[in-house]
Image (cartoon, rainbow, N blue to C red):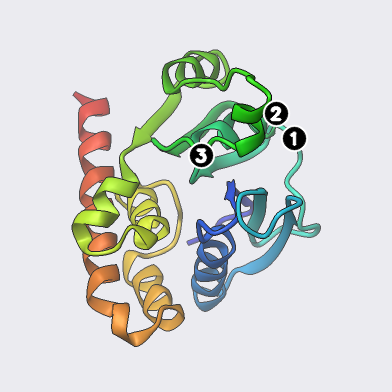
Amino acid sequence: MEIQTYNLLNVGVGGQGVIRAIQILSWAALHEGFKVRTAETHGMAQRGGSVASYLRFGTEVEGPLIPRGETNVILAFEASEAVRNFNYAGTQTYFLINEKLIIPPMIHQQGLEYPTINQIRKFLNDVSKHIHFIPADDLAQKAGNKRAMNVVMLGVLVGMNQIPIKRDTIFNSIMNFIPKKTKEINMKAFESGIETGISIREEKNE
């Protein structure tokens, strides 16, 4: 497939598998012959701090950082991180958001308010018309382990046809990166995500 430039921004917090998800997609893109560039930023803490990982691939990709407003998909593993990075989105950007809030302890300690899912949804609806929330933690738990949430989200990405890489290539990449003992769980998580993505796509087209 001839793709000049595809930009995906994966955001979340430490411990959610953001970097692993981009490694999986990068490997898949390379195996389909694309030129690939990646970059990442980390928050202060290994677990709980903000993490953003940039993936760019295609035939005309140079630098690793995505120009503001030119992201094809923002894949958010934690809902408020989608808001934190909204300025990378344009009106046609797809937001695929895990319906999960991880509230930093200092918010409680200082008595500060944290945005609700409804507030996040309302804010992002003014940014793009393509805002989709996914109960990815619940789907991963049903597959056998909540840590497979990142694989669920990759499945949603595939099911919604929002990445120009073959399903089998991404599946093979997942199997290449995960521990062998979690193969069955991650297979279920990936399929569950795909089914969810297909359902969202079909509802949108009705």
Residue at 68% over, 24% down: 110
Q: Which residue is mark 3?
A: 102
**Mark 3 crowd level (few <14, some 14–19, many ≥20, 10 Å Cα):** some
Q: Which residue is mark 1?
A: 68
Q: CA distance from mark 1 to mark 3?
A: 25 Å
Q: CA distance from mark 2 to mark 1?
A: 6 Å
Residue 119: x and y in percent read 49, 15
Q: Is label 3 in contact with label 2 (beta carbons under 8 Å)? A: no
Amino acid marked by disc 2: Asn
Of the residues under marks 2 and 1, which one precedes in the sequence? Answer: 1
Residue 183, visible in the rendered structure = yes
Q: Residue furthest right?
A: 63
| SS of the residue under disc 3 | loop
| SS of the residue under disc 2 | helix
Residue at 42% over, 46% down: 162
In which quarter of the view is residue 20 placed?
bottom right
Q: Which residue is mark 2?
A: 87
In which quadrant of the rendered image does the C terminus lie? Answer: top left
Amino acid marked by disc 1: Arg
Q: Is residue 21 above or below residue 27?
A: above
Of the residues under marks 3 and 2, which one precedes in the sequence? Answer: 2
Residue 12: x and y in percent read 57, 47
Camera-side residue of 195 and 50: 50
Q: Is label 2 in contact with label 1 (beta carbons under 8 Å)? A: yes
**Mark 2 crowd level (few <14, some 14–19, many ≥20, 10 Å Cα):** some
Lateral position of residue 110 relative to residue 83, left or right: right
